[in-house]
Image (cartoon, rainbow, N blue to C red):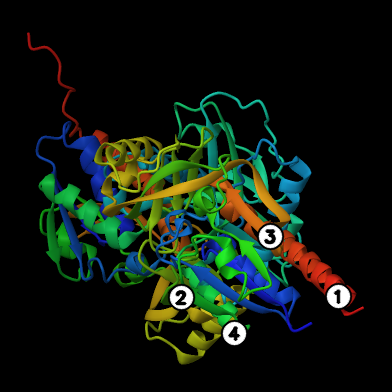
Amino acid sequence: MAPPKVAVVGAGVIGLSTALCIAETCPSCSVTVLSDQFSPNTTSDVAAGMLIPHTYPDTPIHRQKQWFKETFTYLFGISNSAEASEAGIHLVSGWQVFKSTPKEELPYWSDIVLGFRPMSKAELQKFPQHRFGQAFTTLKCDCPPYLLWLEERLKAAGTQMYTRKVADLWELHSEYDIVVNCTGMGAHQLMGDKQLLPVRGQVLKVHAPWVKQFVRDGDGLTYIYPGIHRVTLGGTREKGSWSLSPDAGTTRDIFDRCCSLEPSLQRAQGIEAKVGLRPSRQCVRVQREVLSKGGLKLPVVHNYGHGAGGFSVHRGTANEAAHLVGECISALQGSSSRAKL
Amino acid sequence: MRVAIIGAGVVGLSSALCIHEQFHGLVPSLELEVYADRFSPHTTSDGAAGLWQPYLSDHGNLQETLWNKETFDYLLGHLHSPAAKEMGLFLISGYNLFTEQAPDPSWKNIVLGFRNLTPKELELFPGYSYGWFNTALMLECRSYLPWLTNRLTQRGVKFFHKKVESFQEVSGDGVDVVLNCSGMRAGDLQPDPQLQPGRGQIIKVQAPWVKHFVITHDLKSGIYNSPYIIPGSEFTVLGGVCQHGNWSEENSAKDHKSIWDSCCRLLPTLQKAKIVGEWSGLRPARPSVRLERESIRLGNVQAEVIHNYGHGGFGITIHWGCAMAAARLFGSILKEKKQLATPPGPRL
């Protein structure tokens, strides 16, 4: 069998990291990334890229934890290397504060991030409306740098990248042996996946370089995430909203909520509103299937539906998807050798 | 009542503000004048990164530990005020690293969230086997000194750009109290062999991805003679020399190389950082801070001097506690001179 031709559809953090894992685990594969959008116009570019996991209701916790651990370990290694600034990866410390004590005081990821501990009384004094808090150090993937760095790594591995809107996976059948579907919100139309719904997030990117710490309200709605050049202020979680235009009233509301957590943000400059649609699902779809149509077969590996937790688990799901691609290749090689008999 | 403050670094300006805040209502004739040959951004304070952190050990000098705490608490109280950004004040967390176990510092309960480093955190710093994590404050003097100057100007305090050569020069001119906040050059006003320069050199870089301070310690080579990295609001400061007895304010190529190499070893990501400046300054080092009154006979005049100098590499860290102590000394001078007006009350 000729070297397998793999098409990865989607060039957000999931598409690019999955393509990279495939290129790394299957050097003989020819990998091509196809997407209608590349950085800086992907959903990933809007996100702050913080490694604070989202809990998927229908994915077993041990699997989510494994994904997060692999992602954290991978990025941790890069964060302390000379490439860190180019890759946009850096450590950041801060606080997650709760107005009422959460049911689960120790989240499943508390032993993966660094230095996780409850906040002291003295620290909580800074947040008079909050009664409980957690302090820890985690990683942040700044976009566009991280996506651009992934693109560079892919180019170095010989991966081709093309701007192309794929309206139907079957379009790719004649050119590729295996298709990897990392289309995020695009899978709603592409696969007709009705379980996949947008959760609209509006954020503000501001210039406030004195903000060195993150603060996140445990309700997940209000957060302050300092990046390399800008601080991301959030946010909203609007289920079922497809609007990509920033809303002025929402901008005001986000700004006010963040200023109440961090008053010095009143002095922030260069406020820019952005919107992303979190491709949300009860469980992340990392799964292999073989599509059939009139005697034709198309092996597909899905890797989408990461919702609010894409960055936190991206490398782990990319590893798993690459593994599934390996299974597809074995299956193809198996059937091609059978065909020779 | 005329008060002359000699020195316009963090100690001089904050002492002036503290005294004016406390006494202008009680001493109607109070006039404050600041004399200095260097103003921000050319003072020693301006060169400091601005991290609030005392030395590792207070050597039993509990007074200094208390002044450090008073300063931290005062600044923490201002963190949420609208002035914080203008003051150059913000929170920052980071790492103190050691090659061997070290006793907890005097300030462990002053800062926020003090704890030991976990093994995984230590993986970030090969060569270091022990350390602390805590959240502290940054007070950038290139913002704080202008902020203090504005507050003082609003209060009618006058500024004079001149090098005062002797206490007599000001007290002979009708000044009642002199506040000696002359830092490194206090020896020019009155010999003090205990005051010695602790020369420092720093490299300023653009490394906005660095969000934590990293301070290493070599218990044998002494404080600040080991690499440190302190991210500020506009640039990151790399440092790690403290040369006792060296009066040179010129940048040394040898120190540059040593600081650059050691900081890049500590944080490899710095190799991509762009260098945007370099600076050398003299920490006014003394075995302990000189904060005391002295009555000096100058001709037929009894001059009252309050000394407030010798803050070494912890001037920003201790400044407000010392300012308040200087203000208390000023209050005792006023009592002696029976200058304190009775507090305002109902007129009969």
Report the mark closest to the observer, 2 or 1.
1
Q: Which residue is painted at 36% across and 55% down in the image?
A: B308
Residue A339 disc label: 1
In the current view of this chain or complex, which residue is farthest to the front? A294
Viewport quadrant of the N terminus of chain A: bottom right
Callout 4 secondary element: helix
- Of labels 3 and 4, earlier in sequence is 4
The label number, if any, that marks residue A156 in the structure image: 4
Residue A134: give x, y in percent of width and height: 60, 38
- On the image, the x and y values in percent for residue A24 come to 71, 76
Residue at the image position 59 percent from the left and 35 percent from the top = A120
Taking the image as shown, residue A47 lies to the left or right of residue A29, namely left
- Front of the two marks 2 and 3: 3
Q: Mark 4, residues whose alpha carbon is within 10 Å: few (<14), some, or many (≥20)?
A: few
Dot 1 or dot 4: first in sequence order is 4
Q: Is residue B192 left or right of residue B241?
A: left
**Depth order, front residue of B330/A178:** A178
Mark 3, residue position: A301
Q: Quadrant of residue A22?
A: bottom right
Chain at tag 4: A
Disc 3 secondary structure class? strand
Name of the residue lying farthest toward the right: A341
| Residue B345 position within the rendered picture, expressed as x and y whole percent measured from the top left | 15, 16
Disc 2 to disc 1, C-alpha distance: 76 Å
- Residue marked by disc 2: B200
Seen at 29% across and 53% down, the residue is: A272
The chain containing the residue under callout 3 comes to: A
Which label is found at residue B302?
A: none
**Disc 4 residue type (three-letter):** Ala
Q: Which of marks 4 and 2 is in front?
A: 4
Residue A291 as seen in the image, left or right of residue A246: right
